[in-house]
Image: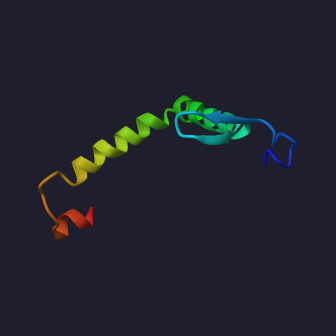
Amino acid sequence: MSLQMGLGMAIMNDPVNGLSVAILGRIFLLLCTLLFLALEGHLLVIDILVQSFVVWPVGSGLSVFSLDS
């Protein structure tokens, strides 16, 4: 997308990984991360993880009852 908009020259060199990353991609990543945190997506992911242990506890194994719910 950045090449089509004429921003192909805006590339940031990452010295840690030795890669070149487009600036527009980094901005989109930052925007999506902030949106995920603002909409409380991180709390939803943690809640889903906790509820998975309630539905299927550790050490219970596979049974017909655990697969029904």
* Residue found 85% across the figure and 49% down from its top: 4
Percent across and percent down for residue 31 are 64, 33
Quarter occupied by residue 44? top left
- Judging depth in this view, the residue of 18 and 5 nearest the camera is 18
The chosen color scheme is: rainbow
* Residue found 83% across the figure and 39% down from its top: 7
- Judging depth in this view, the residue of 57 and 69 nearest the camera is 57
Quarter occupied by residue 43? top left
Percent across and percent down for residue 46 are 36, 38
Percent across and percent down for residue 68 are 25, 66
- Judging depth in this view, the residue of 10 and 59 nearest the camera is 10
Percent across and percent down for residue 32 are 61, 37
Q: In the rendered view, does 67 fall on the left or right side of 43?
A: left
* Residue found 81% across the figure and 39% down from its top: 9
Q: In the rendered view, does 22 fall on the left or right side of 19?
A: right
- Judging depth in this view, the residue of 36 and 54 nearest the camera is 36
In this rendering, the answer to whether 14 lies above or below 67 is above
